Image (cartoon, grey):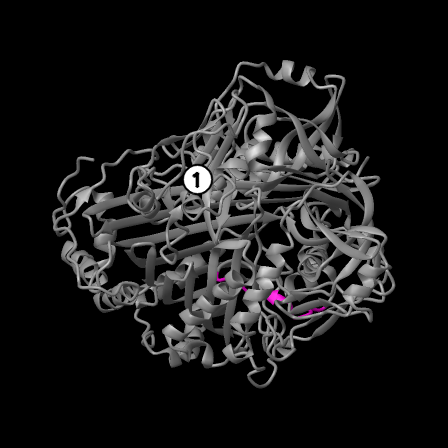
Amino acid sequence: MSATSEILPSPAIPGDLRQLAGDLVAKALRAGARDAEVVIREGDEFSALVRLEQVEKLKESGSRGIGIRVFTGSERSLHSASASTSDFSAEGLRRLVCGALDLARVTSEDSFAGLPEPGEFGALPGELDLYHQDVYSLPVATRIEYARRAEAAAMAADPRIQNSAGGGFDAATGRTVLANSRGFLGEYRRSYCSLASMPIASAPDGKMQRDFWYSSARKVSALDTPEAVGAEAARRTIRRLNARRVATQRVPVVFATEAARSLVGHVFEAASGDSIYRGASFLAGQLEKVVAAPQISIVDDGTLPGLFGTTPFDGEGLPTRRTPVIEDGVLKSYLLNTYSARKLGLRSTGNASRPMAGNPGIGTGNLYLQAGSISPQELIGQIQAGFYVTELMGFGVNAVTGDYSRGAAGLWIENGELTYAVEEVTIAGNLKEMLRNIAAVANDLEFRGPVASPTLCVDGMTVAGE
Amino acid sequence: MAGSKLAGGASGPAEGRFLFRKFGLTERLLERCLGEALSAGGDYADLYFESVASTSISVDESLVKSASYGVSAGCGIRVVSGERTGYAYSDDLSEERLLRAARTAAVIADGPARQPVAGFRETPKSGLYAIPAAEADPHIAQKVELVMRADRAARAYDSRIVQVRAGYSEELRHILIAGSDGAFATDVQPLARLNVFAIARGPSGSARGSSGGGGRVEMDFFLAEKTPERFALEAARQAILQLGAVPAPAGEMEVVLGPGWPGVLLHEAVGHGLEADFNRKKTSAFAGLIGCHVASSKVTVVDNGTLPSRRGSLNVDDEGSPTRETVLIENGVLKGYLSDKLSARLMGLADTGNGRRESYQHIPMPRMTNTYMLSGEDSPEDILRSVKRGLYAVNFGGGQVDITNGKFVFSASEAYLIEDGKVTAPVRDATLIGNGPESLKYVSMVGNDLALDEGIGTCGKNGQSVPVGVGMPTVKLDRMTVGGAGR
């Protein structure tokens, strides 16, 4: 034991995590911090993978960790530093606090640093439909059976599917506690479960294709059936068989929902305050300007009950909220945490994300592109020749310039119909122009993760192939 | 594999006893856990203890805005029965919790109990990297100075550099592995990295550049061998260069890849597809191709975990097996796979020491270490001169591969047009795409200038990240698809 003699609550009792967080904040202040913020996370995970009817992997465990952020110096100009640990012993906690304070000696004074103002804190009321016991109460044998059925449904769907990367059932629960020296103390629990099927199909020439499908939810009872997941996985895999390349050309590119949401993700990166104040974004300086086609609206909303991007408060203890990012093609707001907001002379939008160690970053709530009115079939039906993209590969997106170039696979569109499979081609453009060239948006918005988009069509992209 | 029987208690080489000391482990406790893990049968069980301390510092707008320190520790327990793996972990290393985790992992098996082999045999140490002495950090101010130097150098390079971010991160990982077959290994693995990111602004817009490097080294590596200025100037140079870049071409053309980091081509095009797990399951585009020509006869590719101080190197892998050099492709012919214990046993192959995992929370699987192509005979100048119209790509961002159909991409962040044998205008970012088992057949020239990358690679597979290295000499491919937005 060390020279310090603080008495800390027993870490073995989960109910005391709130108290532990508060005590650590107090300990940091006593040790010389002007302000402090503590996050504690604990969680359990389970995963089962069944392959060719055999259980291949079974994993079940839990872990927890504490992160602390301290501020020292004068009120006008603070130093900050952070530390994290998985060691909840008294000695481990002492080292955590001392480690952060030691590091604060070497960081720079920064007049924009510091916790949010006391009046900004808050949390949405209620559980927000984020936590359901059924995710963890299901017997292990039943979970394995879900995974087995998801794989079996895909294998049974078509004789060309004779192999598989498996069927999986995953579950997780987690609890987050956040406390700071300006009076905020909040916590929430979340649950998650998912069911996946990953078949492999072979063409007569032996060429293989993989694809997958999944269903995820905050409660088991909201999952699609294993049979539905397996059947959809099989359909997506079979349609990739006998894929070919196409000639290099400029055509409209239709982003299916799973591909379209990555475009919304790029808008997030470009609209996040850290990129903006650093001038590292093609959206810097574009507030109230037209940045997208007039039918495009993108909203971030962290308040929607039960969804994957929902929390009662953000990583700094501010209540989550609804923020229109792009409205009818006009950039209305960046997504900000406290630091980037101060840098830009704006207010935080409640989008702070809190890593265990390090300064808060910026995260999404539920970020989505608003649905249009036509069906995906009608959208495709309007296109003479084009590329329907179901999968994108690689990291060829530059948020500074907007340059966009990624590997793509999907189906060719001819005379308004989906025809043969296409692979080993790239699609390229520039995000600035791509957002303005969104010619149509379908009505199939579905929240399968924290970032969502309906099917949409971008005119005039370059497809590079043969 | 000669080894010494372990003595219980706290004698022996100090670095090997770190975890014993720190967590009060005894040889008897390890044996009890392994016994509990095999209480329902199974072919094999192992324990992976890990303790990691990490520090990171970053500079943004010439201010040290972030400094953090983290520690984590835990144990992962695995039971293997045929093709089945049961896994559990705990960050509480009390005897009670370890035994509980062992029982959870044991659920995968359903037979009579088995006894672990009595007595551990320690894998000999190969000493590929220096082992730091202390846990405490007396050098924090010098580490801060490293990132400040990077910031100053990048800004001084050109007045058009308007933003610089620099970061230094390091970790020290102690591991201890004990297997029911008597395998026993410990290692202390340093890992450090310095990164610089610069933004340049010109009359027509902004552009970015980035650079970095490191390895299984400590801070002094950046004082002597690879200075912050070196990385800073490289990031700034790239950002300024990109201000004047023209749209990248689109379509199939001749492509010359520069030496070093462009070896990410090999990592994606062949490396992943040769990991044994995908081939055992016949889900890789390379399944069944051993002995076949998968590349031009000028191509020889190896994976080598034994290079001193390299980011992808390991004295032992995360199953306690010694690492080695494995020939993947020799003169164009596919020679071998990268295996871990499970796939070696099930496929009747040698264990190549490629069983790796991100942390104690993860199940090990076959992974690359340092993957590179050996030098050929052509001079880089001759290679460039031979190209009528093509692309010369010297720096890349990341890559990705679809193991099953073999399609891979990698994204060029610094590339130039080649016109009539001359390197001309820089082009904007573009993704290159190809097919793993086919694309290396178009290698027509291989340079005599093999270089390994600076030590920046992190590979992701099934949600697990591990540090890796790549390398390549200058290489000419007669055709490859370039995904620019231009003509």
Mark 1, residue position: B368
Name above or below for residue B206 compared with residue A169: above
Residue lying furthest bottom: A126
**Relative side of A302 to B110, left or right:** right
The quadrant in which the C terminus of chain A is found is top right
Q: Is residue B100 above or below residue A202?
A: below
First to last magenta residue range: A347-356
Residue type indicated by callout 1 = Met
Q: Say if the magenta span includes residue A354.
A: yes
In the image, residue A257 lies in the stretch drawn in magenta = no
Dominant SS of magenta comes to: loop
The subunit carrying tag 1 is: B
Please name whichever residue, A365 or A238, is drawn nearer the observer in this view of the structure. Answer: A238
Nearer to me, B442 or A217: B442
Kindly identify the residue that appears in the image at 60 percent across and 32 percent down: B439
**Local SS, label 1:** loop
